[in-house]
Each structure stands twice: as C-alpha cells, then as structure tokens.
Image (cartoon, grey):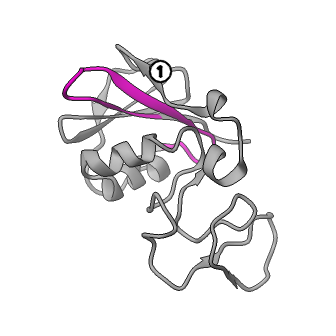
Amino acid sequence: MGTRSRIGYVDPKTNMVHSIYCHWDGYLSNNGRLLRDHYKDLKKVKRLVALGSLSSLEKHVSWRTAPKPFAHRPWRQGDTSRPQFVDKHTFETPVKDVTVAYHRDRGENWNYVKPDVESIMLDLQEYNYLYKNGQWYYKCYKMEWTPIPKGELK
C-alpha cells in the first residue's frame, strides 16, 4: 500500500497552484527529504510537476540528467538480481534515482494524470507538499502548512 502525497508549487506570476499526485513513499522522511534536498529551485520543481502524476519521486526528473551508467533497480519485492544496465527508463525498468511518472514511463492517458491548476492546493492526500517563494512546506492530517525543517526527518 502506498503512502500517497500531493506535490505542487505556487506560480509567482499567476499565484495559481500547479500540483500532481504521487503514489509511493509520500511521508516526510522520504518525499519531503527528496523535495527539500533535490528540488531547490522553481525551474526543477516545474519540470517535475510537468510530468503529471507520479508512481514514485526520486532525486532526478529525467534519466538523461541522472548520473551514468544507468542501472535499473529491481522492481519486484524480494528481487535480489544484480542491477541491469539499461539505456532507457521505463516503469518496468526504472533507472536508479529517477522519478517514475505515469504518463511518460507507463503510457497512462495524459488527461487522467495531468497537473491540476487551482487557486489553492487541495490537501486530499496523506502528505501534501507545496513549493512557494523558494521554500518547501508540508501539511498532513489537518495541520497547518509548515516549512520542511532542516536536518534529519522522521
């Protein structure tokens, strides 16, 4: 079962929120840490959200910008096979540390996974993350928006 999250940003020109769904590992110590540590500027956050809904968030938006050589991680739980070197990133053979998107990597219909654009971020998921004015905020379980703290996250 996934720990679902919503990831978005406030467009400084329109003040509208662009956000997407992410299925796996939405808790603060995973998605919160990845966003805080690897998505530090609006340009990269926009590239992430432009992918549409995600299966999983990782350090890199694209396999083309990830460190080489490309090695996919075993997808099935309990798979202890050695990493396979690949020249393409897919849902079945994701490149290590590269985000997995439903449309790009699994061929899902864009109309079902495209980013939502709203005046406020709907906090419908267990964990919600919002990039605003150069800072990541999170919200879960009816709490207020809180900056993601520095250091170890639990």
Based on the displayed image, in which of its 4 quarters is residue 15 positioned? top left
Tag count in the figure? Answer: 1
- Asked if 27 appears above or below 80 in the picture, the reply is above
Q: Which residues are drawn in magenta?
A: 7-27
Residue 136 is situated, as x and y percent measured from the top left of the image, at 29, 40
Based on the displayed image, in which of its 4 quarters is residue 114 positioned? top right
The residue that mark 1 highlights is 123
- Asked if 56 appears above or below 81 in the picture, the reply is above
Could one spot residue 24 in this view of the protein? no
- Magenta region includes residue 2: no
- Magenta region includes residue 20: yes
Q: Residues within 10 Å of mark 1 (few under 14, many from 20)?
A: some
Residue at the (63%, 66%) spot, across then down: 89
137 to the left or right of 88: left
Front residue of this view, candidates 127 and 91: 91
Could one spot residue 78 in this view of the protein? yes
